[in-house]
Image (cartoon, rainbow, N blue to C red):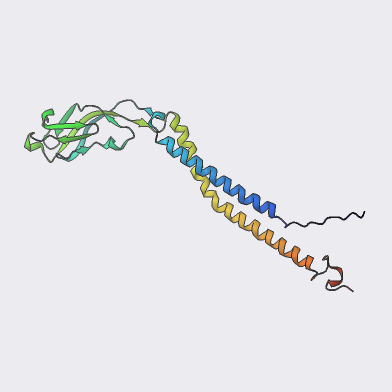
Amino acid sequence: MKQEQRQDKGVAGLTILLSLVVMLFVIGLLVMIFAIMSGKMQDTDTLYTRSGNTAVVNDTLTTVAETGENFDQYAYRGAVCNAVSSVLNATDGIVISSGNYTQTNCAIAFKTGGTVGFNNTNWKVTYTYNYLEDGSGAVSTINDTGNSIASVTDWFDIFIVIGAMVVLILLTVVIITSIRSSGMVAGGSQGANQVGTA
């Protein structure tokens, strides 16, 4: 029985191309997963460490009315403003008694029925506050990791350019291999049909 040699010819570089596509897909998937996880964990207050109380003396609030005015620390994560220790009228320094205002955490408002002269005026408020710190506790590590992962996307342009170069090189190899095997040039596999042979 005659043994035949198999001469299966694969497409040159197809495995490299598929590996490159899969690698880019996996990198993108991992970056997305870690970015989503980091974002969700950053929203969990239990990972943060609460700061100590910080005193704010004579914080000037403009035109305090019944609608209320927020303290500067209102926007801090988990901010807790303790009871104000003093409230002064900013123009003449007169003490505004507690019957003239209501405090709701990090906001203060003129109380309806209070002394009319204090409504819609500037106040100087003294109080203490604390908040959940970004730079301490487990969330510090999460923030650093999240920021590092976010910078990975800057490399995607480079990956795409390198991928395009690999694809162009592989296409060139495939075209040259196809032309050589067609018998149109010397060195091909068609023998008699080769250009320039007897």
Query: 137 or 188: nearer the eye?
Result: 188
Q: Quadrant of the C terminus?
A: bottom right
Residue 193 point in image, percent of width and height: 84, 72
Query: Does residue 37 sit above or below 197 in this rendering?
Result: above
Residue 24 point in image, percent of width and height: 59, 49
Query: 112 or 158: nearer the eye?
Result: 112
Q: Residue at x 80, y 69 (%)?
A: 183
From the viewer's perspective, tell me whether residue 96 is left or right of residue 158: left
Query: Does residue 79 sit above or below 16 in this rendering?
Result: above
Residue 61 point in image, percent of width and height: 19, 38
Q: Quadrant of the N terminus?
A: bottom right
From the viewer's perspective, tell me whether residue 35 is left or right of residue 114: right
From the viewer's perspective, tell me whether residue 171 is left or right of residue 143: right
Query: 100 or 181: nearer the eye?
Result: 181
Residue 191 point in image, percent of width and height: 86, 68
Query: Does residue 85 sit above or below 171 in this rendering?
Result: above
Asked whether residue 133 is in view, the answer is: yes
Q: Residue at x 70, y 62 (%)?
A: 172
From the viewer's perspective, tell me whether residue 152 is left or right of residue 63: right
